[in-house]
Image: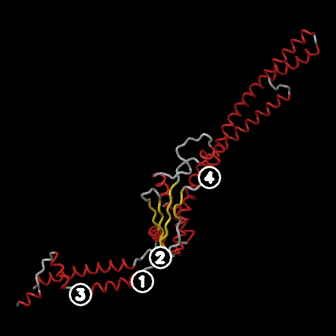
Amino acid sequence: MANDKKGSANYDFASTDLLIYIWAKRKPLSIITIIAIFLSILASFTITPMFKSTVILFPTANASVSKNLLGDNYSGKTSIYEIGDEVQAEQLLQVLNSEEIKNRIVSKYNLLKHYNIDTTSGYPLTKLNETFRSNVRIKRTEFMSVQVDVMDKDPEYAADIANDISAFSDTVYNIMLNERAMDAFLLLQKEFNEILNNYNLLKDSLDVIRSLGVNNYQAQADRYHEAYGRALVNGNDQAIKILEKKFEILSKYGGAYDVLNGQLSNTSSVISRMKQRYVEAKVEAENTLPHKFIVDKAVKAEKKAYPKKSIIVIVSALSAFLLGLILLILNDNIKKKLA
């Protein structure tokens, strides 16, 4: 009777009693843990090893390229050579996560084939997107930079994809910005050409009047009046007739000359101002400057990042040990109640 009582010792599973219980059950727990370690080692060999490559980027500041490069008196607070702030980091993050970049990567590296996705199965694109998003992680760091992590079974692919995601960000950025800048440039170009055409028409009309002898209406009128006065005093009839003809031409075309000359001067001032805007708009439309600073480029990894066999074995062993312990406790309690 005493032996039976000793064999079925009562445990209340306080900290000390739990250790005693574990020691009492060390054989089954050891067997369970060893089996778990063995199985986890076998399982780790069946998992495809993955390699990781990383790119670290900083966004550039949102500054006008044309004004920074061409503006003589530019007094803006930001420069194209400065690192962007939190807003620019979020913008860069959105671009890097865009469908446009993902589609370019998928197309360039034929990821449907590379990921071994059966295109005849149901929802191949959904599987592609899920695999891509699980292998590509893009996040903002605490230092306002953006980190691009790419996992792949091929270390060369991992590095190339990470670097291309970085490179394609400029492509997508410039497509978005240059499209709007080109619309503005074409609108300004149309207006600029119209003003140039108007200037040329005014100049041609003024040249016609000048060919008739009107080159400076006010100055010529003053000189002709002086000469006409001397001719009258001297009784020079021939000079009087010549001057009267010149007065007739001045009277007929002088007003038109003044109007055209004034319009030509105003148009010339407008062209001078618009020329600077035209050049700036052209620079903005053709801008291909990068929108990020690359701190670290991705390089081919030498060691796999996943799976970590030691972690798999440790986690599996602990999990099996705890599960085995729980099952043994439940088994003993059930037996105790049934006894």
C-alpha distance separating marks 1 and 4: 51 Å
Dot 3 falls on a residue whose secondary structure is helix
Is the Cβ of the residue at disc 3 closer than 8 Å to that at disc 2? Answer: no
Q: Mark 2 or mark 4, which is nearer the start of the sequence?
A: 4
Task: Report the residue marked by disc 3.
Answer: 28
Nearer the viewer's eye, disc 4 or disc 2?
A: 2
In percent of width and height, residue 210 lies at 83, 28
Disc 3 marks a residue whose amino acid type is Pro
Q: Mark 4 or mark 1, which is nearer the start of the sequence?
A: 1
C-alpha distance separating marks 3 and 4: 72 Å
Identify which residue is drawn at 69% across, 37% down.
Answer: 272
Which of the 4 image quarters holds residue 207? top right
Disc 1 marks a residue whose amino acid type is Phe
Task: Report the residue marked by disc 2.
Answer: 303
Query: What's the coloring here?
Result: secondary structure
Identify which residue is drawn at 57% across, 69% down.
Answer: 108
Dot 1 falls on a residue whose secondary structure is helix
Badge 4 local density, few (<14 within 10 Å), some, or many (20+)? some
In percent of width and height, residue 82 lies at 53, 51
C-alpha distance separating marks 1 and 2: 15 Å
Residue 287: mark: 4
Dot 2 falls on a residue whose secondary structure is loop
Badge 3 local density, few (<14 within 10 Å), some, or many (20+)? some
C-alpha distance separating marks 4 and 2: 40 Å
Identify which residue is drawn at 80% across, 34% down.
Answer: 204
Nearer the viewer's eye, disc 3 or disc 2?
A: 2
Left or right: where does residue 339 sit relative to residue 304? left
C-alpha distance separating marks 3 and 1: 26 Å
Task: Report the residue marked by disc 1.
Answer: 45
> Is residue 208 something that shows in the picture?
yes
